[in-house]
Amino acid sequence: MGTRKQEEPSVPVIQRHSVANQVYSDLRNRILSGQIPQGERLVESTIARSLGISRAPVREAVNRLMEAGLLENRTHFGPSVVQMGNEKIRELYAVRNSIESLAIQAVAQRHSKDNIAELRFLIMVMSDRAEANDLPGVVEAELAFHEALWRMADNPYIQKIAGLLFDHMRLALTIDNAAYGNLVDVAREHEPLVDAIETGNPDKASEALTRHIMSSLETISGS
C-alpha cells in the first residue's frame, strides 16, 4: 500500500496589489490629515525607500491617487498633492450647492423629528470642538453633518455623487474653516439650515443651504 505524499502547508502570499492598497491608504490618510501638505511633491523612489519596498506598488498607489484627484501632475514637477485654491474651492462648492440643495429639499419635505435632533446634536459636537479650538475636529464634525444630510435624503444617487466629492471637501473645509476668526462661527452657520428644515418648506431649506455655501466662499475670499 503506497504512502500518501504529505501536503505542504499553504503559505499565504502577499500580492503586490495588496502592498499597493496599503501604500494607497497610507498616502491618502496622510494627505487628508495634512501630514503631506497641499502642493507637496511625491517622489516615488523616496516613498519606496522609506517603506522598504519596490517602486512598482508605490507607482500603482500614486496612479490611483491621481485618478481620485488627490494628486495632480504638474509640468516639470511630477505628481504633487492637489492644491485647493480659491478657484478650485468655488468649482467644488458650485457642485456641492447643486447636490446638497436636492438633499436638503428632500430632508425638509420629511422634517422628521429624529433627523432634526441628529442634526442639532452634530452642530453641538461641532460647537464643542470649535470651543476647544480643534480645527481637525471641527472639520470632521462638519463633514459628519453634511454626510447626515446626504443620507437623510434617502436618494442613493445623491449619496454616490456626494461621496465622490468627500475627500476634496475635507481638503477644502480645512482651508475654509481655518479662515474663520472664531471657529464657533462655523457651527453657528449650520443652525439656519436645521431651522429651515424644521419649517418643512423645501424652498426655504434650499435657499438657506445656498446662503451657507456662499457665506463660506466669502470667508475664503476675504482671508
Image: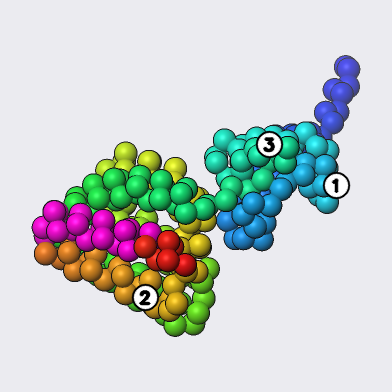
Indicate the secondary structure of the residue bearing disc 2: helix
Q: Tag 1: residue type?
A: Arg
| First of labels 2, 3 by sequence position | 3
Which-is-in-front pick, marks 1 and 2? 2
Asked which quadrant contains residue 58, the reply is: top right
**Bounds of the magenta span?**
200-217
User: Which mark, by number, is residue 185?
Assistant: 2
User: Which mark, by number, is residue 75?
Assistant: 3
Q: Is 83 within the magenta?
A: no
Picture coordinates of residue 92, whole percent (x, y): 41, 47
Residue 191 appears in view: yes
| First of labels 1, 3 by sequence position | 1
User: Which mark, by number, is residue 49?
Assistant: 1
In whole angstroms, how far apart are the C-alphas of marks 1 and 2? 44 Å
Relative to 97, is 65 on the left or the right? right
Closer-to-camera residue (46/83): 83
Which-is-in-front pick, marks 1 and 3? 3
Q: Tag 3: residue type?
A: Thr
- Specify few, some or many for label 2: CA neighbours under 10 Å numbering under 14, 14-19, or 20 or more: some
Q: Is 207 within the magenta?
A: yes
Picture coordinates of residue 126, whole percent (x, y): 40, 73
Which-is-in-front pick, marks 2 and 3? 3
Q: Where 117 falls versus 15 (above or below)?
A: below
Picture coordinates of residue 110, whole percent (x, y): 15, 55
Relative to 61, is 222 on the left or the right? left
- Specify few, some or many for label 1: CA neighbours under 10 Å numbering under 14, 14-19, or 20 or more: few
Residue 26 appears in view: no
Q: Tag 2: residue type?
A: Asp
